[in-house]
Amino acid sequence: GAAAQDGKMILGKWYTADRESIVEISYIGKDQGFSGTVVWVNESVGKKKAAKILGRCIFSGLTYSVAENKYTGSIYVPQLDAVKDCEITVDGMQASVRVHVGFFTKTSEWERCKQE
């Protein structure tokens, strides 16, 4: 459908794999692509960590490739306090987030928030 062609299926709120936070993904513009900001943090992570990531832009410069059916861009990894390359594949209510760190790739499964 049209949503798949322009990459809009990534828009909305997503639970991170550990369910410690919710990231809202929005479209910034043709040049900047999509970005994702932490809009909610579970209080179980502790005040210090929550304060560090709440409101933080996690994804930046995400662009969608129709041919490859995936997004590529950058992700901020709090555990490393670094920005890394990432790929995201969206399948309905699920998103696979692949982060490239050196020779390693870590994939985590995110779930779309039900209230969307």
Image: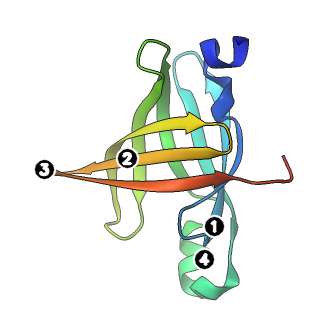
Residue 88 against residue 29 in the figure, above or below: below
Whether tag 3 and tag 2 are in contact, CB under 8 A, the answer is no
- Disc 3 residue type? Phe
Q: What secondary structure is found at the residue carrying circle 1? A: strand
Please report the residue visible at 41 percent of the width from the left and 19 percent of the height from the top: 68
Q: Earlier in the sequence, mark 1 or mark 3?
A: 1
Please report the residue visible at 49 percent of the width from the left and 36 percent of the height from the top: 89
> Which residue was labeled with disc 3?
103
Q: Determine crowd level at label 1: few under 14, some 14-19, many 20+ residues with C-alpha closer than 10 A.
A: many
Image location of residue 29, percent across then percent down: 62, 21
Residue 106 against residue 68 in the figure, above or below: below
Whether tag 1 and tag 2 are in contact, CB under 8 A, the answer is no
Q: Earlier in the sequence, mark 4 or mark 1?
A: 1
Please report the residue visible at 75 percent of the width from the left and 54 percent of the height from the top: 113
Taking depth in this image into account, of 88 and 45 the one nearest to the observer is: 88
Q: Determine crowd level at label 2: few under 14, some 14-19, many 20+ residues with C-alpha closer than 10 A.
A: some
**Residue 100 relative to residue 76: left or right:** left
> Which residue was labeled with disc 2?
98
> Which residue was labeled with disc 1?
21
Image location of residue 39, percent across then percent down: 71, 59
- Disc 4 residue type? Ala
- Measure how far apart labels 4 and 3 are at the Cα level: 30 Å
> Which residue was labeled with disc 4?
50
User: Which of pointers 4 and 3 indicates the residue nearer the eye?
Assistant: 3
Q: Earlier in the sequence, mark 4 or mark 3?
A: 4
- Disc 2 residue type? Arg
